[in-house]
Amino acid sequence: MNGQKTVYNKRESSKRDTIRLDDATNLILKASGYDLRPFAAEYTRARLNRHLLPPHHAPSPSTSPHSQITQLSRQDVISALSLNVTTMFRDPLFYCTLRREVLPALNARKHLRIWEVGCATGEESYSLAITLNELGFANRYTIVATDFNASAIESARRGKYNIKKARAFTHNYHRADGQYSFSDYYSATSEFLIVSPELRRNIFFREADVTKEGIDFRPDLIVCRNVIFYFSRRQQIETLELLSGSLNDGGFLCIGSKEPLPAHALKFEMREISEGGRIFAVQAQDRAKPGLCHRGNLRSLTLTDQPRRNQE
Ligand SMILES: C[S@@+](CC[C@H](N)C(=O)[O-])C[C@H]1O[C@@H](n2cnc3c(N)ncnc32)[C@H](O)[C@@H]1O
């Protein structure tokens, strides 16, 4: 992280009020226990300036960035870092590739295990469930959907979205090769669209930070889209190694269509099977190290320790 970058109090952005990003990072770690270093410096700086240090967060005009920072909770910091932009069937082409290439290749498996990293408010999780159900996987799959933002996870569990989004959701569903009517998958009130209990059945939402926690099962499919984009280069590599090392033999790893892939820096080969969707087949012999999911100081999520059922 570049120690010369500064964050500042926008109201009084004189030199006196600036604080070096490195110093802010150390103070935040001490105060809230959350380590910002896995994130890209420019992203961290922008998010701190925008969410943590603007005047409305300051108890009084004379409050310095130092003292604001020392009052931050872990959730304040995570909320500021967490960009929850998502939608149902985001990048429809990705779901077309899942339908046509990836899921058919996994169809012979008895039970599919899926790890969705950075599920935000759940739209991606429910889109995956719809796709799996339409391909006949019915109860033959489990999705463990994780995000480090506890309030996003709560929203995801509720599966309740503004009814005004229904039109955009429906449009994307059809572009993603949806087979039926999107309205089959929700009930509606004047204000909300509520996803059907059938879609929630095989999804377990969990709060977990992918920079600090792994899992102790081997997923056949990992979906980590639009998450590593915000990480430092080093963290991108570490996360891709963690994910590829966690995969079951013959599994697939999906990242966002616009995400950088520091391929030359990776210690393993990934065969890109779809350019549009950035889906990779990772073969067992290509893994950086088998069992990376159990490595070092990463805490592991288990399939069995977790099921706190979603609200129905
Ligand atoms: C832009 S959203 C992407 C949501 C969804 N995957 C999609 O593509 O529509 C990024 C999500 O990643 C989550 N995230 C960011 N850093 C994370 C981390 N270290 N561990 C777990 N989740 C993280 C954020 O909270 C946010 O909900």
Image (cartoon, grey):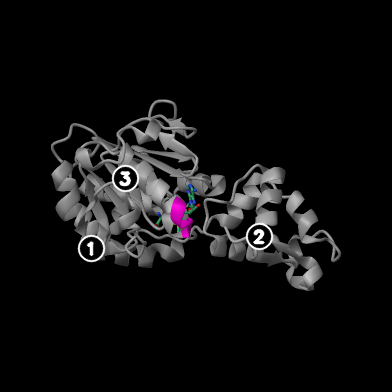
As drawn, the label of residue 213 is: none
The span from disc 2 to disc 1 (Cα, nearest Å) is 36 Å
Q: Counting residues from the N terminus, which is met first, the one under dot 2 or under dot 1? A: 2
Check disc 2 and report the residue beneath it. Answer: 21
Rendered location of residue 260, percent (x, y): 36, 62
Does the magenta segment cover residue 160? no
Disc number at residue 222?
A: 3
Please give the name of the residue rendered at 51% of the width and 45% of the height, measured from the top-left corner.
Answer: 148
Which one is earlier in the sequence, the residue at label 3 or at label 2?
2
Instruction: Note whether residue 128 is visible.
Output: yes
Nearer-the-camera pick, 175 or 192: 175
Q: Amino acid at mark 1?
A: Glu
- Residue highlighted by disc 1: 275
Residue type (three-letter) at the residue carrying disc 2: Leu
Q: Quadrant of the C terminus?
A: top left
Left or right relative to 29: residue 192: left
Q: Considering the numbered disc 2 on the image, is that residue within a helix, a strand or a loop?
A: helix
**Is residue 73 shown left or right of residue 218?**
right
Give the crowd class for mark 3: few <14, some 14-19, many >=20 residues within 10 Å.
many
Q: Secondary structure at mark 3?
A: strand
Instruction: Confirm or deny contact between disc 1 and disc 3 (CB under 8 A).
Output: no
Span shown in magenta: 230-234
Between 114 and 129, which is closer to the camera in this rendering? 114
Task: Name the residue: 83% across, 61% down.
Answer: 63
